[in-house]
Image (tube, helix red, strand yellow):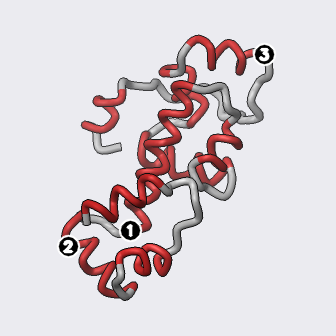
Amino acid sequence: MGPLLLWIGQNVGKQLSLSTIARHAAMSTRTLSRRFLEQVGTTPVRWIAGARVRRAQQLLETTSLSIEQVATAVGFRSASVLREHFGGIVGTTPLAYRRAFGNSKSLESRSSSRSTEVFGNPPPVLKHDTLRAAGR
């Protein structure tokens, strides 16, 4: 699974269907799903969502891309899909994450044009390791 996971990580911004991944792995979709779960501990779809969220975190920390641009860059269909997965995995919104962990350059350029995200007061954001340790 190592080479396959590497390939998925390199292509995370593309639309990766189960059949596309299975073809790349030279397996049937059923065999891929079974082996992926056995060896990785999760389904291919969940692993891809996690990889996309990890890439989104990197972009939110280092770029001034809008949330919509980040969502597109990492392979999600829209910002709302990114928000759904991001919240489930990280435990906060992409905007709150950027405010907590973004570099000053990305924060300055974003502050001049407010995001359309309106969530009221965001939950407190914890450091990366604390969020992961909490199982979020």
Circle 1: element type: helix
Q: Residue 86 carries which label?
A: none
In the image, 17: left or right of 41? right
The residue shown at (43%, 40%) is: 90
Q: 63 or 94, which is in the foreground?
A: 63
Residue at the spot of label 2: 38
Of pointers 3 and 2, the one earlier in the residue sequence: 2
Residue type for callout 1 = Pro
Q: Going 55% across and 37% down the picture, which residue do you hit?
A: 93
Up-down relation of residue 6 to residue 26 (above or below): above
The amino acid marked with disc number 2 is Glu
Q: Where's the N terminus, which quadrant?
A: bottom left
Mark 3 touches mark 1? (CB < 8 Å): no
Label 2 element class? helix
- Residue 44 is situated, as x and y percent measured from the top left of the image, at 38, 68
Q: Distance between the residues labelled 3 and 1?
A: 39 Å
Return the residue at label 1.
44
Tell me if residue 99 comes above or below residue 85 in the rendering: above
Q: Which residue position holds label 3?
A: 112
Work out how far the residue at label 2 is from the one at label 1, CA to CA, in angstroms: 11 Å
Q: Which of marks 2 and 1 is nearer the N terminus?
A: 2
Q: Are marks 3 and 2 in contact (CB under 8 Å)?
A: no
The count of marks equals 3
Distance Cα–Cα, label 3 vs label 2: 48 Å
